[in-house]
Image (cartoon, grey):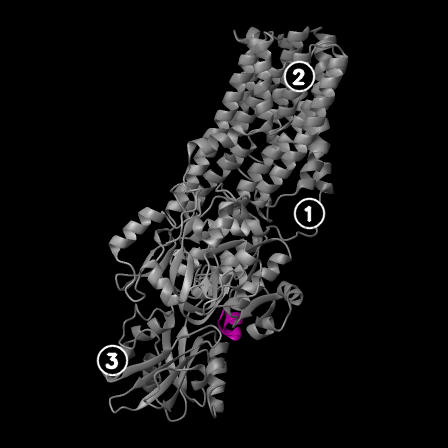
Amino acid sequence: MLPGVEVLREVGVDAVRGLGPEEVARRQAQFGPNAVSSHKARLLPVLWHQLRSPLLGLLLAAAIASSLVGERGDAVIIGVIVAVSVGLGFVNEYRAEKAAEALHSQIHHETVVVRGGRAASVDVAMLVPGDVVELRLGDVVPADVRLLEVTGLQCDESILTGESLPVSKGTASVPVGTPLAELAGCALMGTVIRVGSGRGVVVATGVRTEFGKIAAGLGTHQLDTEFQVGLRRFSLLLVSVAGALTASIFAINVVLHKPIIDALLFSLAIAVGITPQLLPAVVSTSLAAGSRRMSRHKVLVKRLVCIEDLGDVDVLFTDKTGTLTLGRIEYMRAVPTDGQDPDTVLRWGLLGTENSIQGDQDAAGNPLDQALWRTPAAAREKAVLAGYSRLAVLPFDHERRMVSVLVSDGSGQATLVTKGAPESVLERCDDVPAAAREALAAEFAAGNRVIAVAIRPAVTEAAVIRPDDENCLTLAGLLVFLDPPKPDASAALGRLAALGIAVKVVTGDNPAVAAKVCRDLGLGSGRTMTGPEVDALDDTRLAEAIISTTVFARVSPEAKARIVHAQRRSGGGVAFLGDGVNDALALHAADVGISVDSATDVAKDAADVILLEKDLGVLADGVAEGRRIFANTIKYVLMGTSSNFGNMASAAGASLFLSFLPMLPSQILLNNLLYDSSQLAIPTDNVDEEQLRKPSHWDIAFIRRFMIRFGPLSSVFDFVTFAVMLWIFHAGPAQFRSGWFVESLATQTLVIFAIRTRRIPFFRSHPSLPLTLAALAAVTVGALLPATPLAHTLGFQPLPGAFFAALVCMILAYLVLIEIGKHFFYAAASAPTHRHARYGFHRHLRRRAAYFSTAEHQPEHTPTRP
């Protein structure tokens, strides 16, 4: 690795001025966007996603074979049905991809870059090699950067190396060939600044970075949720079942001397019939519709899959300020120590402002400092403050929890002013009066926020301030601020509790203040832990302590992230809500990071979900919407794995004793298409309140049990239909197929009204109007087809009126039997006792990759570095 000076020379940039606008434009054209993935919806990839199904390939092959042996009618019918099925899936998935693209267009990640001699925030995607970037606490490193300056810089590189401990960084060169984990002079794209700050020059962007090389190999399709991963695994189970049925049915039909091509097509149709083909379309439609509804509830999700993750949350860690409190911090008063007066304490507090001592409230960033400058007393002090000059600053950090400023008055007398958390400041003071400690305890007990101010004389020659200088201080006094609880916070906490979510407060504030606010809002009766207590526990004991703890106070950013990690390892979904720089690490660590529109850029960049209002009630709306989407999707799954399974088992059984195929392959596919089409309205359905009261998550064992229990119930009425058609109506092959087609479609479609709810009887839960109309329309079309001019082409024959009377009786009996089955099934069903951590390394890598995403297509080649 080259020294920093040589790197600057090689990339052709001045470390002070940075690149000029013309050079930036030239390099952007040369190297493209600084991105590793694309979120633009594209027609061909979405179409290929529909066409790549192995079963679809088999069906197309069977259609070609039918045509070659003269069964061109069947070939055309199969081709049309496959085309319509693919078209439905394509339209819905493309709409979902467009919704995801719209979400991405509303989210921008920015980084601080020096260009033309000025520091400015630019979109991460616009970075080019040679840019000089500033790195701050909580930032995601925007590219591969050769470090030029560092101040206690440490990076979390677990996304690249899997190492959980932060890595210290410097500016020294390392030998060529040094392993990735030991590149101490570089900050690598996708890693997170855990401690300190730094400045460096970009040496690689996009897919040319170390992170980009890994992320590019994972593909650019939307991230999969745990639910989607479970669906894929369950689909493999269905494919194996379908494969076994296909092989056995084909063999049996060949043994029974039935036409080989008919046996093959029938077997393949059985395989397709048992598989819920439009499940991806139902999931995509649900997510896209959910994102639109959530935006109306003032919840913006960066990626569609975050919606289902949000519904899976059962523990929420949240900060206090602005979430449980109004967030409008107001300065109340100064409490002086012996020999001081309130105005003097306020003056020292104003001089100890990190960003400004001239009353620039915007530059003073810190809300507490802004509150100081807003007070009328500050205006009276401006004339006095003008006589001071700033000599040096030691910025605030979350380890020291203090800021120190060296100032000089008009006579040249230098004073070190230290301001910060009372516990930190007081332990560095000499002879703290007992009255001051009593006053501090009283303010904390009242729930007020307090800042301590201390001073000591200093030598004017000092050019810098070191942490060792913050000693032997004299306490000047206390600055007291008020941030009252939100009037609606208690009700919002009640809503979250009703949703089965345990809320825990993680704050840098004083334990007594945080506990007082929580008590006032009725938030649990758990214990309060401090940062040092958290640090003293190993991960196992910390996970155990989290269960009984409601408030974590005076915790560092690293401790916040560690708390979240510990909870995630215990299982369940974990969300973190924060809006400050010190929350960024925990937001990255959570399953769902949540921030607000008014948050710092660092926090918004780290979050998956943005609340347009910092209100737990808005968050409760988002959680409920996530669970509503899951509940509606699972309705389709339960139907597809029970009634389809039963119907296909019936077809397999019937083929053993009938001299003809019980249903033609094209009829099975048409039945499946009509049924699936009606279920595309499921995302609009209403969901019972009791289904929203606990986290939703994938449970493959539950669905398997449901399939085994309810599938045979469908087969019972199929065989009743067989008996009616053969022994009462003495039906031939065409009429038999017509009768079973209508009965099969009617029962498996109308059963949605019973399966969609756990309530008994089912009519106590009201379905949505679109679902009702879609289901009735599918059944009506199926019932009318045997009487239409298309009947002969489709292999149907008109049915007698008496059949429909028998059909109504069978449907009613079927629904009653389903209700009885529901009673016993749900009475015996129990939730899983333990849930393991859900997501692996690759999922978090792909989640980070979405941070570096543009609408432009990403090149597959790797251009040379500058």
Question: Can you identify the residue that label 3 sits on?
Answer: 382
> Which residue corresponds to the image point at 40% horizontal and 57% vertical from the top-left?
203
Q: Amino acid at mark 1?
A: Ala
Element under disc 3 = helix
Which is nearer the N-term, disc 1 or disc 2? 2
Tally the numbered discs.
3
Question: Can you identify the residue that label 2 sits on?
Answer: 264
Which stretch appears magenta? 507-517
Residue 854 to residue 144: above or below: above
Which is nearer the N-term, disc 2 or disc 3? 2
Residue 184 rendering spot, x and y as whole percentages: 49, 66
Confirm whether the magenta stretch covers residue 515.
Answer: yes
User: Which residue reaches farthest front?
Assistant: 176
Residue 98 rendering spot, x and y as whole percentages: 41, 37
Q: Amino acid at mark 2?
A: Leu
Does the magenta stretch mainly form a helix, a strand or a loop?
Answer: helix
Q: Is residue 521 left or right of residue 28?
A: right
